[in-house]
Image (cartoon, grey):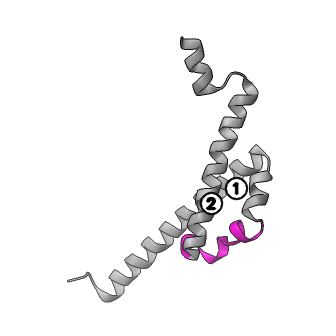
Amino acid sequence: MWRHRNELVHGADAAANAQRILTGLHDQVRQHYQAYQLDPGYVLSRHMHLFTSHSLERHLQMSYGYVTCWLQSVDEARQQLADHIETQHMAAIQFFGPPP
């Protein structure tokens, strides 16, 4: 019973497990592209090349290593956007004073 369960959860062999992992990465890529299409401000303008240099279909054809690297780059770009927003917020408070 446990063997059957583990095969369902983790795949019957290494190839099935690798495909499961790649499918999860592809889902993340799709989510980022969808969010970017809904809001072009999803990343700073200097990071838009992450979405404009290759199409979604092209990214889904890339290797595991390329996809994981791209996802890390998008995560870093999102963090830089959050840092930029926080910096702008603090500068506005310093200039205009705290909100009433």
Image spot of residue 97 (x, y percent):
28, 85
- Residue 42 within the magenta-colored segment of the rendering: yes
In the displayed structure, would residue 83 be above or below residue 58? below
For the point 79% across and 51% down, which residue is it?
Answer: 62
Q: Which image quarter holds the N terminus?
A: top right
Between 71 and 94, the one nearer to me in the picture: 71
Disc 2 secondary structure class: helix
In the displayed structure, would residue 93 be above or below residue 21? below
**First to last magenta residue range:** 41-54
Name the residue tied to disc 1.
70
For the point 69% across and 67% down, which residue is it?
Answer: 51
Disc 1 secondary structure class: helix
Name the residue tied to disc 2.
74
For the point 72% across and 22% down, which residue is it?
Answer: 13
Q: Amino acid type of disc 2?
A: Val
Image spot of residue 40 (x, y percent):
58, 75
Q: In which quarter of the image is residue 16?
A: top right
Q: In which quarter of the image is residue 34?
A: bottom right
Toward the bottom, the furthest residue is 96
Q: In which quarter of the image is residue 50?
A: bottom right
Total numbered circles: 2
Crowd class of label 1 (few under 14; some 14 to 19; many from 20; radius 10 Å)? some
Q: Which image quarter holds the C terminus?
A: bottom left
Image spot of residue 59 (x, y percent):
75, 57
Image spot of residue 87 (x, y percent):
45, 74
- 98 relative to 36 in the view: left or right: left
- Residue 78 within the magenta-colored segment of the rendering: no
In the displayed structure, would residue 54 be above or below residue 44? above
Q: Amino acid type of disc 1?
A: Trp
Crowd class of label 2 (few under 14; some 14 to 19; many from 20; radius 10 Å)? many
Disc 1 to disc 2: CB gap under 8 Å: yes
